[in-house]
Image (tube, helix red, strand yellow):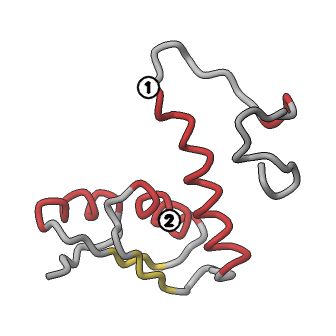
Amino acid sequence: MGHTHDGGYAQYCLVPVAKSFRSRPDCPGGIGAVPETLQTVYESLTPGLDLTANQSLLVRGGTSSVGLAASALAKDLGATVLSTTRNPDRAGALKEQGGGPRADR
């Protein structure tokens, strides 16, 4: 949406069936934001930065949804990931993700 099909921010839009999926009834309402987050990260890291294996990426705000997605994609591409967070209590989440820790002060 917004790249090859106009109207991603319209009140109503027509989406090709191939670009849609049915969510389970027990999924939270925020599931609709996942494609937007992943698209933002993908466009930023691949065509935007042309990130490749053996490069390093610093993710500021590494415990945010976009930060976590960026770390996952960068690691998938073979890059070394370093992440920051303002909250030292979240350093464990960065360790689990494999991108840190380094707490901003």
Q: What residue does disc 1 label?
A: 28
Question: Does residue 5 sit above or below 98 in this rendering?
Answer: above
The residue positioned 55% from the left and 63% from the top of the image is 73
The residue positioned 58% from the left and 64% from the top of the image is 41
Q: Residues within 10 Å of mark 1 (few under 14, many from 20)?
A: few
Q: Where on the picture, by quarter, is residue 15?
A: top right
Identity of the residue furthest to the top in this view: 25
Image label count? 2
- The three-letter code of the residue at mark 1 reads Pro
Q: Position of residue 76 (x, y in %)?
A: 56, 64
Q: Position of residue 20 (x, y in %)?
A: 75, 31
Q: What residue does disc 2 label?
A: 70
User: Mark 2 or mark 1, which is nearer to you?
Assistant: 1
44 left or right, relative to 105: right
98 left or right, relative to 8: left
The residue positioned 47% from the left and 22% from the top of the image is 27
